[in-house]
Amino acid sequence: MELALEVEDLVMHFGPVRAVDGVTLRIPQGSVVALVGESGSGKSTVGRCIVRLLEPTGGTVRLAGADITHLSRRQLRPHRRDVSIVFQDPAGSLDPRFTVGDIVGEPLRLMRRKEIPTKVHEALRRVGLRPEVAQRAPHELSGGQRQRVSIARALISEPRLLVADEPTSALDVSVQAAVLNLLADLQRDLGFACLFITHDLSAVEYLADEVAVMYLGQLVEQGPRARIFGKPAHPYTQALLSAAPVPDPAEQRARQPVLLGDDLPSAIDPPPGCRFHTRCPVAVDKCRTVVPETRTIGEGGHQVACHLVNDDGTGPDVRPDVRPTEGVAR
C-alpha cells in the first residue's frame, strides 16, 4: 500500500501552548481521511504542519516517503507540487490584487508562459466555472465560486495530497453540498489523497474513507468510517456523534445528547492521565493518573486510546439513544 502521507509523533508547541502533542497519522494514496474534533483541538495546526506553513516542534512528516519536516524553503521546492491546501475562508485566501487567472495559474509560474492560460481554463472547467471567470477579480465572485477557485488553484499542479481545512464551513448551507460533491468527484477522478479537516460529521459520513478523532492536541480514536460511525469506542467520539443533528425532525427532538462535564482543560496546562477525563461521564481513577496507550481493537485497523475499552472493542457506551448502524454507503 503506497502512502501519500506519514505523520509520526507530530508535536507543535506555541510557547507554553501545546497545540499538537504526539499525533501519528497515515493516508494511503487515493483515500480520504477526515480529521474531526471540537474547535481548538489542533486540527488546523496539524494541516498547516503537513504543508509546512508551520515547522513542527517535533516528530516527522513524510510526503510520498520524503521527510520534509525541517527542510529549508529552497529544499522544499521539489516537494511543493506534491501537496496543496484549501483554506476555510476563500475570501481571505485569494489575493484581491490578482485576477482569478493569475491566482489559479500561480503554481505554474515555472512553465512556459503561453501554456499557462490553457491550463488555467482547464482547471476552471474542472471545478465547474466558465473560462471567462479567469478575467474577473475575487470580489466579483460569490462565496461558492471563490472556493471553487481555491480548489482549482490547489489541484492545478496535480498534487498527490490535498489538505482541505474546513472547506465548506464559511459557505451557505445551500452551497456546501455542491462543494462536497465537487470534492468527491475530483478525488475519484484524479486519485489524490485527501486530509479532510472538519467538524461537520455529516460531511465526514459522506466523503471520508477513514476518520481520526482529535481532542486537545491528541488523537483519541481512528478507524474506518463505517466502524467509527457504527461502533464508536471512545466516550468523546460517542459524544460528538450524539451531538450531530439527524434529518428527521421528530427523531431529532426525541434524541438525548451526551452531557459532558464543563471542566474545560487548557492546552497550556493539560490535565494528567487521559486529557478527556475532566469531562468524561465514565472516568475512573486510572483515567486521572495514567496516560492511555493507543491500541488496535476489533478488526479493520480500529484504534483507540481509552483505558475502559476492551481489546475486542467492547466498553462503556455513554450515548442514551444508541441506534444500530451498519455504515453508510458513499
Image (tube, grey):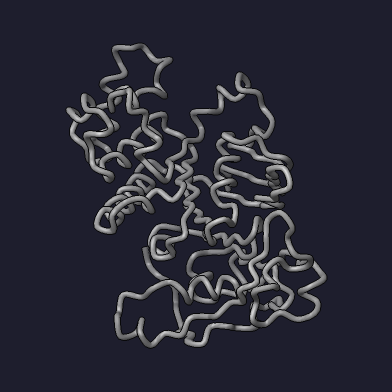
User: Horizontal and vertical percent for residue 151?
Assistant: 36, 39
Along the viewing direction, whichever of 30 and 169 lies nearer the viewer: 169
User: Horizontal and vertical percent for residue 189?
Assistant: 34, 44
User: Horizontal and vertical percent for residue 168?
Assistant: 36, 52
Give the vertical position of 39 relative to 237 (above or below).
above
The residue at 65%/76% (across/down) is 280
Q: Is residue 268 left or right of residue 301?
A: right
User: Horizontal and vertical percent for residue 194?
Assistant: 47, 47
The residue at 64%/59% (across/down) is 216
Give the vertical position of 226 relative to 251 (above or below).
above
* Quadrant that contains the C terminus: bottom left
The residue at 66%/58% (across/down) is 218
Give the vertical position of 234 relative to 100 (above or below).
below
Residue 284 image-quadrant placement: bottom right
Q: Is residue 311 left or right of residue 153?
A: right
Q: Is residue 273 left or right of residue 203?
A: right
The residue at 29%/81% (across/down) is 249
Residue 246 image-quadrant placement: bottom left
Along the viewing direction, whichever of 307 and 264 lies nearer the viewer: 264
Residue 103 image-quadrant placement: top left
How many numbered discs, if any? 0
